[in-house]
Amino acid sequence: MRTIRPSVRLLILVAVMALIGAACAGDDASDTTEPATDTTEPATDTTEAPTETTEAPTDTTEAASGEPIMIGLLSDLTGFTPWAVQARDGMLLAAEEINAAGGVDGQMIEIVEQDSENDADAGVAGFERLVEDGVVALGGIISSTVGAAVSPLAEELQMPTFLVKSGTEVALTADSRFMFRTCLPAAPMDAAPVLQYAQEQGLTNVGVIVADYAWGQAFAGAVETTFEGSGVDFGEIQVAPVPPDTDFTPFVRNMADAGAEMVIATGHPPGNSAILGLSADLIGDVPVTGAWVPPDLAVGQQVDVAVGRYADFACADYTSESYAALAERYFAFSENTFMSDDAVAGHGIVTMVAQAVGEVGDDPVAVAEYMHQNSFDLEGYAHPLSWTEWGELAEAQPIFFRITEGPAPAGLNEAGEWWLEVLTQSEPLEPYQP
């Protein structure tokens, strides 16, 4: 049995100083890379089922006998609820399946939850409580705010920590050894798949709109660097405020006047829904790229506008046999109406940690070393999971998909008849180096 490291006040001070340092360096750690759930009303009306269910659907992750292997869930069960519930249910499903097969050498897996609330202080407090509880690793982090806040603690406490949609580049440093991305790559990496698709389609003029906060600014910088010399003109990047009081009309009209053949809205997650609708009216039948949003949340009640136009990225391959098999089991377990890549990542986190514990034991340092030494082919994923020395995705190849009118394959979409078409898969992305 390993010794649980106690939480001390000094560690909180370390985290606070790290955040102050990041802010002084120009990174706003309080901003997030994901859509705020209260700013996308048109796209959230049909997602009540997943957002209302914040209690675990079953108690099947409790140890049947003996001492359990505890894995922490640190996610925004209030704040980014649809994303967090997906990640949580994926983790719980993996634990249930492993336990049903006898656990890890007879030890059952227990998922221990803390709500990070899309808040740095809550994230740090939840992280420390999970460490005190004796978790061997933790994952499910959605918010960039939380990812940046807990990163210093992960290194100080030597606790393997898995990000899902926390895309801020400041969550990883050159010295990171215990932080691991699992789905969304660092912000500077996310423009390359957009350029690849534009070039494949022969587009020469695109419009770019970003949010006026850290994620949007980081993505804008990535566009400027990645598109330079590519032959694809992006004109003047439109920098728009964050809703709810934002009128996107002038920004979309500017892109229309510039003759945009595609609207790149990946840098403005909170505005995806409004931008999608306005672009249909002001520009016409051009694709609109989203910001790694769960498809059911993105479509919402805008099916007619989304079909054939809304395109987005995922670390899961929604059209693969592997995803289909996992989704069927997921729907029998979860009350969600779609299995997003957040759930696929959650399932993968528990799968990898259980494999590591089975091979090297429950010491967190050994678990982290095992992660760095191996590559994982996980169910439902679009690419293998492996990492650079500092925890960035080393083999990221996100898929780029488009909403179609369907019908969806039987049993794979309880949110509607629409379905997904893979447009392309990214070439391997060059890992961002802090």
Image (spheres, grey):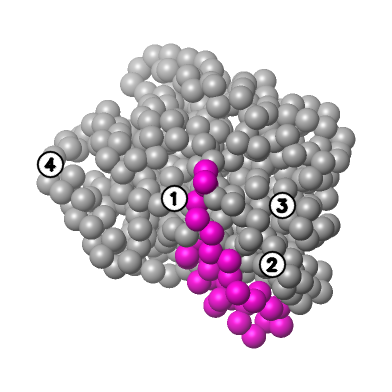
Q: Is residue 356 visible?
A: no
Name the mark nearer the viewer: 1 or 4.
Answer: 1
Upstream in sequence: badge 3 or badge 1: 1
Instruction: Determine which quarter of the picture holds residue 335.
Output: top right
Numbered tag placed on residue 255 in the rendering: 2
Q: Within the magenta stretch, is there residue 38?
A: no
Q: CA gap, disc 3 to disc 1?
A: 24 Å
Upstream in sequence: badge 4 or badge 3: 4
Q: Amino acid at mark 2?
A: Met
- Left or right of 167, for residue 318: right
Q: CA gap, disc 4 to disc 3?
A: 50 Å
Q: Which residue is mark 4?
A: 9
Q: Amino acid at mark 3?
A: Leu
Q: Where residue 36 sits in the image (x, y, percent)? A: 50, 42
Name the mark nearer the viewer: 2 or 4.
Answer: 2
- Badge 3 marks a residue whose secondary structure is helix
Residue range in magenta is: 216-245
Q: Tell me what residue is drawn at x 33 percent, y 66 percent.
A: 26
Q: Residues within 10 Å of mark 3 (few under 14, many from 20)?
A: some
Upstream in sequence: badge 2 or badge 3: 2
